[in-house]
Amino acid sequence: MTPEELHQRRDKERAKRSTEEDHLLCCTAAGCLSCGSEDVLHSLRDAVKTTEANVRVSGTGCLGLCSKGPLVKRESDGAFFGGLSPESAAALVPGRADLVDRQTLAEHRIEPTTPFFALQQRIVLENAGRTDPERIEDYILADGYEALSKAVTEMTPEEVLSEVKKSGLRGRGGAGYPTALKWELVAKQAATTKYIVCNADEGDPGAFMDRSVLEGDPHRVLEGMALAGYAAGASQGYIYVRGEYALAVQRLEKAIRQAERERILGNRVLDSAFAFQVDIRVGAGAFVCGEETALLASIEGRRGEPRTRPPYPPERGLFGKPTLINNVETFANIPPIIRKGGDWFSSIGTERSKGTKVFAVAGKIVHTGLVEVPMGTSLRTIVQDICGGVPGGGKLKAVLTGGPSGGAIPESLLDLPVDYESLSKAGSMMGSGGLIVMDDETSMVDVARYFMEFCMDESCGKCIPCRAGTVQMHDILARISRREAEPSDLEMLAKLATLLKETSLCGLGQTAPNPVVSALRYFREEFDEKLVKHPLAENTSRTASERRE
Amino acid sequence: MSVKTLKIDGEMVTGRAGETLFNVAWDAGISLPRLCHVGGLSDVGACRLCVVEVEGQSKLAAACVTPVEEGMVVHTNTERLREHRRLLIELLFAEGNHVCSVCVSNGHCELQDLAVQLGVDHVRLRYQHPKRGVDATHARFGLDHNRCIFCTRCVRVCDEVEGAHTLDVSGRGASLKIICDLGEPWGQSETCTSCGKCVQVCPTGALYLDGASVGEMEKNRRFLQYIVTAREKREWIRKG
C-alpha cells in the first residue's frame, strides 16, 4: 500500500460512515467479555437486521468503566450504557426502542459528562470507543498508520528520534527511563542486525493496562514498533505476550496478518525502502520474564533467567545483537507523538514526567477500571473524583501502586501528584500502573504477606537473596499475621529487606521488599500490635514486681 | 589491549580491559568469598557473595561479573558487606538440609569453610527442612539434592567443558532442582559420559563419588586448569 492508497482508503471509509445513521460500539475487552458483552454484541447485530435503519454495530477496545460492564457506546450522542442484558441492549438500535420501556434504558445510561469520563485525557486509549480492534480500516479511519506513512515519506530516522526526544516520553514499564535515550543508544550501534522488542509480559497483580491496549488497539502497538524500527535501524520486531492473554495474542495475530496483507508491514513498508516485520512470542507463565534480560533469554529459547547488566540490551541484547526493548504503553504513545509532534506531547504532564499515564484501578473502589490521566494528576483525583472513592461509606486507608515492586501510599499523602519522582520519593514506584485501593478493613500485614508470597512463588531461584530471602521474609510475615512472631523477628525482617534490595541480581529481587518496607514505614503500629512479647521478658518483669512487693 | 588502573582496598592494582574485578583482585592476592564462581567456567553472578562496594555507585556490584574500569575505588571487606555475606550463608543453611556431621564433605566443604571464615556460628533464620531426595542411580556418582546450593557449577562444567549438557536446572524459586536430561534418574541418562567433572567442581557434598563416607569426599579441581590452559594456550602440561 502506498501512502496515497492509505489516504484513499481512509477517505473511502469516511464516506461510507457519513451515510450511516448511528454507530453502536460494544466493548469487547476481557472485562466486558467476562460479563457477557459477546451476547450483547450479537443481540445488537440481530436487532439491526430487523430494522431498516443503517446502523453500524461493532466491537471496540476497553471503555474503561469495567465495573459497569458490559458497556455500549452510542456514537450519535456519545452516551454510554452499562450493565446491559442482551434484550435491553437491542433497544438501543434506532427504531427498536419498542423492545424495552424508556425508563429501563435510562437506568442504564451513563452520561459522558460524568467525572469518570470527563476528567480523563486519553492518548493511549484514544481509540477505545472509536474503532473495532479487529478491523484495520477502523484504525486507518482514526488516522492510523498516518504517523508511519509520514515518517517513511517525509522524515529521516534522525528526525523521528528528535521528535521523540522533544516529547520527553519516558518508559511506561515502571522505571521511567527516557525513551529517546534508549532509542539513540540502539540507533548509534554499528551492527546491521538489530531488534525491536515489545514487552507485553504484564504480570503485576491487579494491572491490566497493557492487556487493554493490546486487545483494544493492536495496530497502534505495531505502528509504534515500526516507527521505533525506522528510527533505530531495525527490521525485525518481537512482541513478547504473556501466555494468559489469549485474546490479546489472537487480536495481535489478526492485526499482523492484516497489516502484512495491506503491505503496511513487510519488505516494503508503505512502498518505501524500509522493511519491518513483527512476530509474536508467547510466554509460559513466569513473572520474571517481564524483566528484560530474562525476557530476551526466553525469546531465544533459553531458561527465563535474568543476567547481570551491563551489557544492557541496547549494546548486547537478543541473540547478542543491539536490541530496543520498550513496554506496550510506551510504543502506544509513539504514533500520536509523530503525528502531532513532540511539542504537543510535552505540553501535557509535569516538568519531568510528560504525557499521560494509564492506570488500572482495582480493590475497594466504586468504579474499577481503566483510567488515563495527565501525569501530575493527584492520586486523590483519580481515586475520589474519577473512581468514586470507597463504596458503602468505608474509609480509604491506602493506595498501592507498582504492584509487588511498589508500595502503599497512605491516605494522608493522597494529594501527591502522580509522576515518577514523587512516587519513588514516597517509597513506592510508578510501576506499570496498577492502583489497588485499600479501605480500613484491610490489614497491611496481610497485604505485605500477599505480595511477598507472590515474589516468593515467582522468584526464578538463580540468586540466593531472592530465592531463599523471599521464603524467609514470607515466613516471618506469616508468623506476624498469625501473632506468633517476636520483636526480634521484625528486626530480622528489616535486615532481610536490606539484603534483598542491595544484593539481588535483578529488579524482581531488588524491589521485592518494597511493599514490606513501605508498610513498615507508614503502618508500623499494625505490625507491632501483632507481635508477641517474649515469654521470658514477661516472666522477669513479673518476678521483679513481685519481688518489690 | 588497554590496561586499567584501579584501587582495591587501598591498594593500586592493574587489570586488562574486560577482566572482571574478581580476577583482578585475585591476582592482587585478595580472595573474595564465592560459591558460584570457579576459574575456567563462565560467570553467572548467582551467589552474590562476592559483592563489593564501588565508590560513586549506589548499588553493590558482584565482582565476578563486573568488568574493571579506570579509576575505580573498590572496597571488598566493609562491615556492611560482611553482614550481608553472613546473612547469605545463613540463608543457604536454612534453605537446604546441611548437616555437616553426617556429610561426605565434612571438612572439605566450601560452604562450611565460608561459614567458619565469616563467623557464622549459628543461624538466626527458620530452617525450612525441605524434602528433596537423593539420586543414587548412577554407578559411580551420587547426587544428594538436600545439600545442593544451586551454584550451577555442575551444569556449567557439564556444558562448557565436557560438552555433554546432561545436567540442567528445572523449576523455580524454592522448588528449584538439578536434573539429568529431561528429569530422568541419573543412571538412565543417555548423554552422561560419567566423566565426573561435576562431582569435582561441586562446592558441597551434593555431588559425591559413590562409596565415600563421612568426611571422605575431597574434591580435586586441577583438571579444570589443565583443560582450560590446553584450550586457550595449546599447552598440554599439568602443573603442580
Image (cartoon, coloured by chain):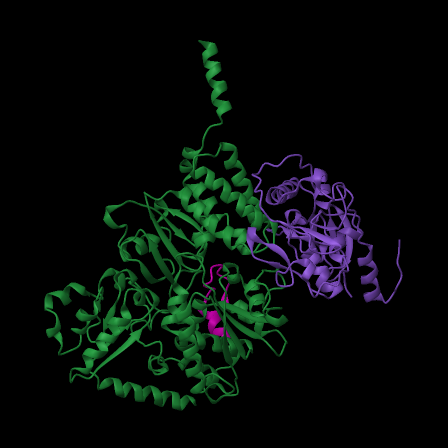
Instruction: Determine if the magenta segment contains residue A402.
Output: no
Residue A36 placement, left or right of A506? left
Q: Which chain is purple?
A: B
Judging depth in this view, the residue of A415 and B65 nearest the camera is B65
Q: Quadrant of residue B18?
A: bottom right
Q: Magenta residues?
A: A161-179
Does A45 sit above or below residue A314? below
Q: Which chain is green?
A: A
Instruction: Determine if the magenta segment contains residue A174.
Output: yes
- How far across and how far down the image is residue A80, in percent? 22, 68
| Quadrant holding the N terminus of chain A | bottom left
**Which residue is painted at 56% across and 52% down in the image?**
B175
Judging depth in this view, the residue of A248 and A62 nearest the camera is A248
| Quadrant holding the C terminus of chain A | top left
Judging depth in this view, the residue of A257 and A21 nearest the camera is A257
**Which residue is painted at 54% across and 63% down in the image?**
A292
Judging depth in this view, the residue of A523 and A163 nearest the camera is A523
Residue A344 placement, left or right of A538? left
- How far across and how far down the image is residue B17, in percent? 74, 62
- How far across and how far down the image is residue A199, in percent? 49, 67
- Residue A251 in sight from this viewpoint: yes
